[in-house]
């Protein structure tokens, strides 16, 4: 797998995919957080606590890395 990222183009693809995932899913995760926190009630928008942010960022980071790696594996340049 480490040979997969030996080319600069592959590393760039991984970084771009990783950053796009983090940016887009940050907003999606905030929406899901608020739906879960206020389910059954009027939808409100609150900023998560520091502890909740830590959990959200850890999960997002993990899945961003998985998505970036899979994107690079699937891309023709990586085969």
Image (cartoon, rainbow, N blue to C red):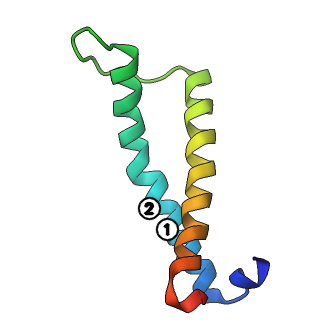
**Quadrant placement of the N terminus:** bottom right
**Image position, residue 64 (x, y; %):** 56, 56
Q: Is residue 18 left or right of residue 23?
A: right
At x 43%, y 43%, the residue is 26
Q: Secondary structure at mark 1?
A: helix
Q: State the image coordinates of residue 3 (x, y, percent, origin top left).
A: 76, 84
What SS does tag 2 mark? helix
The image quadrant of residue 69 is: bottom right
Q: Which label sits on residue 1?
A: none
Say whether residue 48 is left or right of residue 2: left
Q: Specify the quadrant that holds the C terminus.
A: bottom right
What residue is shown at x 38% (from left), y 52% (from top)?
24
The local crowd at label 1, few if under 14, some if 14 to 19, many if 20 or more residues have their Cα within 10 Å, is many
Left or right: where 73 falls relative to 40: right
Extreme-right residue of the structure: 2
Task: Describe residue 27's horizontal placement relative to residue 72 as left or right.
Answer: left
Instruction: Reply above or below: 75 against 58.
Output: below
Whether residue 69 is situated above or below residue 13 in the rendered picture: above
CB-based contact (under 8 Å), mark 1 and mark 2: yes
- In percent of width and height, residue 75 lies at 50, 83
Residue lying farthest to the left in this orientation: 42
- The alpha-carbon separation of the residues under discs 1 and 2 comes to 5 Å
Tally the numbered discs.
Answer: 2
Q: Quadrant of residue 14?
A: bottom right
Query: What residue appears at the point 60 percent right and 87 percent down from the top-left corner?
Result: 78
Q: Residue at x 59, y 78 (%)?
A: 73
- In this view, the residue in front, 16 or 73, is 73
Residue picked out by circle 1: 17
Check the image and report above or below for 28 versus 13.
Answer: above
Residue 75 lies, with reference to residue 34, above or below; the image says below
Which disc, if any, is residue 20?
Answer: 2
């Amino acid at each position: 797998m480490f040979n997969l990222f030996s080319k600069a183009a592959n590393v760039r693809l991984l970084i771009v995919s990783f950053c796009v995932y983090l940016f887009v899913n940050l907003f999606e995760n905030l929406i899901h957080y608020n739906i879960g926190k206020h389910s059954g009630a009027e939808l409100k928008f609150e900023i998560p606590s520091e502890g909740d942010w830590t959990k959200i960022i850890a999960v997002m980071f993990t899945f961003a890395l998985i998505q970036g790696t899979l994107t690079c594996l699937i891309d023709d340049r990586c085969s």
